[in-house]
């Protein structure tokens, strides 16, 4: 009969197979025999323990809250896929931000160039004769003295991201070919000045306009480099200010024009570099700024080459 260990509110059930029925704090387990008078074979009653039940509930709860190895691998896989999708987007966004910051630098340089032209009615020479061999003689120093702010505006953010400091950008010397000699002064490493146009040598004296470079290197005698310019280019000599490149992104290390390991940072046309998504920013003589892929700046085409020269002519064959 019913044990005294159980509550009077007890629910009796008989089933044909082993089965447990929970009622409040009690458990009823039946055997295969439905007969309640079968001499103890029909029904077996097992009291439930609260502590064991609570322990079981907690165990089940902890199991449900924990990650299985498969679930963890799935989560890691999803994160990896998202990272693969998002990282290139973030990289492009950063590159775009650096390009815009570079254009902001050029805008400030352009304002200062305009101020210089208003004051002197001529463009600064790539390197002034009186300052040959001194850092102060280069075009960027001349603009800085005119009120271009600090040397920071001559620092392209993309070079800064690659580890070049403002000081190195401004004062790194030209690599000297003679061992054990100090490097010669050089202009900044970020923005080049259109010293020669598409020419790599002054036009022969026998040609119209002979003895001239096609850029702002200044008027020089035949065979002399723009660093020995005697006369700066007058503003009036620029035929199409809105279609002539004055300053652009460049790498002076890439200005070896004839393979002799001697570099010519005045030759912006061959030193221009696409450091912004394979493209470069360029400042024109009228102070507007353009961005374009590298081939847009240097492709062998009349419409491209003419943008580098004072007379707005391509001079593609040296004529």
Image (cartoon, helix red, strand yellow):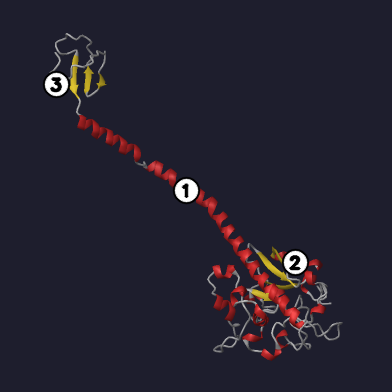
Disc number placed over residue 79 in the picture, else none? 1
144 relative position to 6: left or right: right
Q: Secondary structure at mark 1?
A: helix
Sequence order check: which comes first, mark 3 or mark 1? 3
Give the quarter of the figure containing the N terminus: top left
Give the x, y percent position of residue 248: 68, 71
To which residue does mark 3 refer?
A: 5
Judge depth for marks 1 and 2 and give the one in front. Answer: 1
In the image, residue 316 above or below residue 40: below
Give the quarter of the figure containing the C terminus: bottom right
Report the Cα–Cα distance between label 2 and label 3: 100 Å
Report the Cα–Cα distance between label 3 and label 1: 56 Å
Give the quadrant of residue 205.
Answer: bottom right
Give the quadrant of residue 132.
Answer: bottom right
Residue at the far left in the pictured view: 4
Name the residue: 60% across, 77% down.
151
Sequence order check: which comes first, mark 2 or mark 3? 3
Q: Secondary structure at mark 3?
A: loop
Name the residue: 22% across, 19% down.
28
Give the x, y percent position of residue 168: 55, 78
Sequence order check: which comes first, mark 1 or mark 2? 1
Name the residue: 53% across, 71% down.
163
**Decide: marks 1, 2 in contact (CB < 8 A)?**
no
Give the x, y percent position of residue 294: 69, 65
The answer to whether residue 249 is seen in the rendering is no
Report the Cα–Cα distance between label 1 and label 2: 43 Å
To which residue does mark 2 refer?
A: 299
């Amino acid at each position: 009969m019913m044990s005294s260990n159980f509550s009077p509110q007890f629910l009796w059930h008989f089933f044909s197979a082993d089965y447990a029925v929970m009622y409040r704090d009690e458990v009823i387990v039946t055997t295969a025999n439905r007969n309640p008078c079968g001499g103890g074979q029909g029904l077996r009653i097992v009291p439930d323990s609260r502590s064991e039940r609570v322990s079981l509930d907690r165990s089940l709860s902890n199991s449900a809250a924990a990650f299985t190895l498969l679930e963890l691998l799935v989560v890691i896989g999803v994160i990896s896929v998202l990272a693969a999708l998002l990282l290139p987007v973030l990289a492009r966004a950063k590159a775009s931000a650096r390009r815009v910051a570079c254009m902001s630098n050029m805008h400030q340089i352009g304002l200062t160039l305009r101020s210089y032209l208003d004051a002197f009615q001529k463009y600064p020479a790539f390197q002034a004769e009186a300052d040959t061999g001194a850092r102060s003689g280069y075009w960027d120093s001349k603009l800085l003295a005119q009120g271009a702010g600090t040397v920071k505006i001559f620092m392209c953010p993309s070079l800064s991201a690659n580890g070049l400091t403002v000081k190195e950008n401004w004062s790194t010397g030209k690599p000297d070919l003679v061992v054990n000699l100090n490097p010669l002064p050089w202009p900044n490493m970020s923005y080049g000045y259109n010293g020669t146009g598409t020419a790599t040598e002054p036009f022969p004296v026998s040609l119209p306009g002979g003895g001239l470079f096609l850029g702002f290197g200044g008027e020089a005698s035949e065979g002399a480099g723009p660093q020995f310019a005697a006369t700066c280019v007058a503003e009036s000599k620029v035929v199409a200010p809105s279609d002539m490149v004055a300053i652009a992104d460049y790498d002076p290390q890439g200005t070896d024009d004839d393979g002799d390991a001697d570099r010519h940072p005045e030759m912006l046309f061959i030193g221009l570099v696409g450091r912004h998504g394979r493209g470069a920013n360029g400042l024109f003589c009228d102070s507007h700024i353009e961005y374009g892929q590298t081939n847009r700046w240097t492709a062998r085409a009349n419409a491209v080459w003419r943008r580098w020269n004072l007379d707005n002519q391509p001079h593609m064959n040296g004529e």
